[in-house]
C-alpha cells in the first residue's frame, strides 16, 4: 500500500495524497494533475479484503461528469470506488473507460452501467475481455471466494473500432490508444494531452515486478513500451505501483522488458538449454529492488524463453 513517504520519494510536486485508505478499503486517492486523480491499490496479491483491487484505477473530473478509468474486479468494489470519487466531487460517474482485460480493469463495469454510466473500450480490448471473462471469474472465485458474488461480466456495448480514438467530455480531451499488445492483448492507454498524464494500464508496472504470463506477448510488450515513450508523458499512472515519471517507468518496466528479451534471445542464439538460462539469469541486480522480484523473476525468464523459442 502506498504511504505518504513513498509518494514524497516519487519527487513529483503535483502528487498529493488526498485520502489514505480506511479500514478494509485499501485504495488511496492521489491528485496527479488538476482534476485528475489516481486510485492506488496495494502491491500485494488479491484477497477477500482488498476485493482483488491490487491495482490502480483513476478518474478525471470534467464539467459534464466524471470519467472513471477502469472499474475494479467485482460488483462489491463499485460502491467503494463511488465513495472515493464522491469525496472529491459531486459530479456523477458518466463514463467508464476500460484499459485492459484483466479482472481488476473491467469486471466491475456492471455496477456503473446499471447506474447509467457509458462503458467505453477499444474493440481489441473487448475481444480479450470476452475470451478471458469466464476463466477470470473462476479464478476470482477461488481467490476471494464470495467477495465475487454479484459480479457479472459486462463489456462495452459499442466497442470503438480504431486504435487511436479521441474522446471528449465536458471540454476535457482524452485519447484512448492502442500502441501494441502488452500485459494482455488489446491493452490500451488513456492519454490526456493537456495535462500530460498517461493512464498506462498494465503496460507499465512501478515499484513491483511485472508478470509475464503465457498470454503476455513479451516482445510486443517491449515494443509497445518503446512506442509509449513517444508521448513524453509528464506523469504516468501505472497499472500497479505509485505514479511517477517516464524515467521511473523505464527503470521499473521498460529496461526490464529490454533485458528479458535481449538475454533470452542470446540464450537461444547460443542453444543454451532452459535450465542453464534460468541459472545464468537468476540474478538481475538492476531489478532486484522491485517488490515480488523473488517470486516473479524466474517465472518471467521461463515464460520469455518458452515464447521466444516458439517464435
Ligand atoms: Zn493488473
Image (cartoon, rainbow, N blue to C red):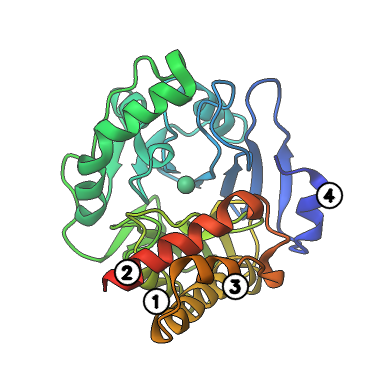
Residue visible at 33% across and 23% down in the picture: 115
Q: Quote the CA–CA distance across marks 3 and 4.
A: 36 Å
Q: Secondary structure at mark 3?
A: helix
Read off the residue under disc 2.
Answer: 180
Read off the residue under disc 4.
Answer: 5
* Quadrant assignment for the C terminus: bottom left
Read off the residue under disc 3.
Answer: 280
Where on the picture, by quarter, is residue 9? bottom right
> Sequence-wise, which precedes: disc 2 or disc 1?
2
User: Counting other residues with Cα less than 10 Å from the Cα at mark 4, is it few (<14), some (14-19), or many (20 or more)?
Assistant: few
Q: Where is residue 217 drawn, in percent x and y?
A: 34, 64
The one of 197 and 260 positioned closer to us in this rendering: 260
Q: Give me the disc on residue 117.
A: none
> Mark 1, mark 4: which one is toward the viewer?
1
Read off the residue under disc 1.
Answer: 223
Q: Quote the CA–CA distance across marks 2 and 1.
A: 7 Å
The answer to whether residue 209 is left or right of residue 6 is left
The one of 131 and 235 positioned closer to us in this rendering: 131
Q: Quote the CA–CA distance across marks 3 and 2.
A: 30 Å
Q: Secondary structure at mark 4?
A: helix
The one of 217 and 234 positioned closer to us in this rendering: 217
> Sequence-wise, which precedes: disc 1 or disc 3?
1
Q: Where is residue 178 drawn, in percent x and y?
A: 31, 65
Q: Where is residue 89 drawn, in percent x and y?
A: 56, 35
Q: How many marks?
A: 4
Residue 67 drawn above or below residue 184? above
> Sequence-wise, which precedes: disc 3 or disc 4?
4
> Sequence-wise, which precedes: disc 3 or disc 2?
2
> Mark 3, mark 4: which one is toward the viewer?
3
Q: Quote the CA–CA distance across marks 1 and 4.
A: 33 Å
User: Counting other residues with Cα less than 10 Å from the Cα at mark 1, is it few (<14), some (14-19), or many (20 or more)?
Assistant: some
Amino acid at each position: 500500500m502506498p504511504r505518504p513517504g513513498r509518494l514524497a520519494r516519487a519527487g513529483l510536486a503535483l502528487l498529493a495524497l488526498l485520502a489514505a485508505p480506511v479500514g478494509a478499503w485499501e485504495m488511496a486517492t492521489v491528485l496527479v494533475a488538476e482534476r485528475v486523480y489516481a486510485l492506488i491499490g496495494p502491491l500485494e496479491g488479491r484477497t477477500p479484503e482488498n476485493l482483488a483491487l491490487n491495482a490502480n484505477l483513476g478518474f478525471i473530473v470534467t464539467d459534464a461528469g466524471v470519467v472513471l478509468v477502469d472499474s475494479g474486479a467485482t460488483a462489491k468494489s463499485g460502491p467503494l470506488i463511488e465513495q472515493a470519487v464522491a469525496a472529491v466531487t459531486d459530479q456523477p460517474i458518466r463514463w467508464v473507460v476500460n484499459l485492459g482485460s484483466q479482472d481488476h480493469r473491467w469486471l466491475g463495469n456492471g455496477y456503473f452501467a446499471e447506474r447509467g454510466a457509458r462503458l467505453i473500450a477499444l474493440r481489441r480490448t473487448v475481444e480479450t475481455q470476452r475470451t478471458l471473462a469466464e476463466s477470470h471469474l473462476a479464478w476470482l472465485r477461488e481467490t476471494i471466494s464470495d467477495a465475487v458474488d454479484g459480479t457479472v461480466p459486462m463489456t462495452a456495448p459499442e466497442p470503438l473500432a480504431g486504435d487511436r480514438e479521441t474522446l471528449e467530455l465536458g471540454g476535457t480531451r482524452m485519447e484512448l490508444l492502442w500502441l501494441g499488445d502488452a500485459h494482455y492483448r488489446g491493452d490500451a492507454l488513456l492519454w490526456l494531452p493537456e495535462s500530460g498524464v498517461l493512464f498506462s494500464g498494465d503496460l507499465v508496472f512501478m515499484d513491483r515486478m511485472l508478470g509475464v504470463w503465457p498470454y503476455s506477448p513479451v516482445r510486443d510488450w517491449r515494443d509497445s513500451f518503446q512506442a509509449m515513450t513517444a508521448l513524453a508523458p509528464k506523469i504516468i499512472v501505472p497499472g500497479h505501483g505509485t505514479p511517477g515519471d517516464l524515467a521511473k517507468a523505464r527503470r521499473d518496466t521498460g529496461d526490464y522488458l529490454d533485458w528479458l528479451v535481449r538475454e533470452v534471445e542470446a540464450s537461444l542464439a547460443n542453444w543454451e538449454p532452459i535450465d542453464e538460462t534460468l541459472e545464468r539469469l537468476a540474478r538481475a541486480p538492476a531489478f532486484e529492488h522491485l517488490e515480488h522480484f523473488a517470486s516473479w523473476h524466474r517465472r518471467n525468464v521461463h515464460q520469455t524463453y518458452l515464447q521466444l523459442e516458439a517464435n
